[in-house]
Amino acid sequence: MTPQPSAPRGTVHIRPDRCKGCQLCIECCPTHVLALSADYNAKGYRYPTVVNDDCIVCQACATICPDYAIFATPFHSEAGPIRPPEPALVRT
């Protein structure tokens, strides 16, 4: 019997200043890593916060975020650092 590899773990990075509080990232997270913060950003929106360290680096949060306000990176990456997704268009 071969041992099962451990599940990937990652770190969630949140850019509160970009968030508009849609909560899509919170709803789509399969491991329930995110919750809505009690704090507000400069635009007056509540933004997500990390509530546990169960991130599996699925990038569902980054994929669904319309404002490019969140992404995840692996704890250790043999390919080197992973860059956050860059917006195709500058949104104001």
Image (cartoon, rainbow, N blue to C red):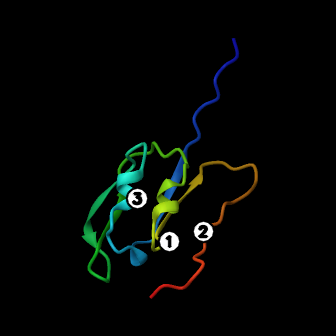
How busy is the neighbourhood of tag 1: few (under 14 within 10 Å), some, or many (20 plus)?
Answer: many
Residue ranking furthest to the right: 79
Give the residue pinned by disc 2. Answer: 85
Q: Earlier in the sequence, mark 3 or mark 1?
A: 3
**Label pair 2/3, CB-CB below 8 angstroms:** no
| Image vertical order of residue 61 relative to residue 43, above or below | above
Name the amino acid, label 1.
Tyr
Q: Which residue shows up at 35% across the image and 53% down it?
A: 27
How busy is the neighbourhood of tag 3: few (under 14 within 10 Å), some, or many (20 plus)?
Answer: many
Q: Which residue shows up at 36% across the image and 59% down it?
A: 49
Name the amino acid, label 3.
Cys
Q: Which mark is residue 38?
A: none
Residue 50 in sight? no
Residue 74: x and y in percent read: 60, 50
Judging depth in this view, the residue of 91 and 52 nearest the camera is 91
Helix or strand or loop: what does disc 2 sit on?
A: loop
Residue 47 in sight? yes
Choose top left, top right, bottom left or bottom right for residue 4: top right
Q: Quadrant of the C terminus?
A: bottom left
Q: Earlier in the sequence, mark 2 or mark 3?
A: 3
Q: CA distance from mark 2 to mark 3?
A: 15 Å
Q: CA distance from mark 3 to mark 1?
A: 11 Å
Name the amino acid, label 2.
Pro
Q: Earlier in the sequence, mark 2 or mark 1?
A: 1
Give the residue pinned by disc 3. Answer: 25
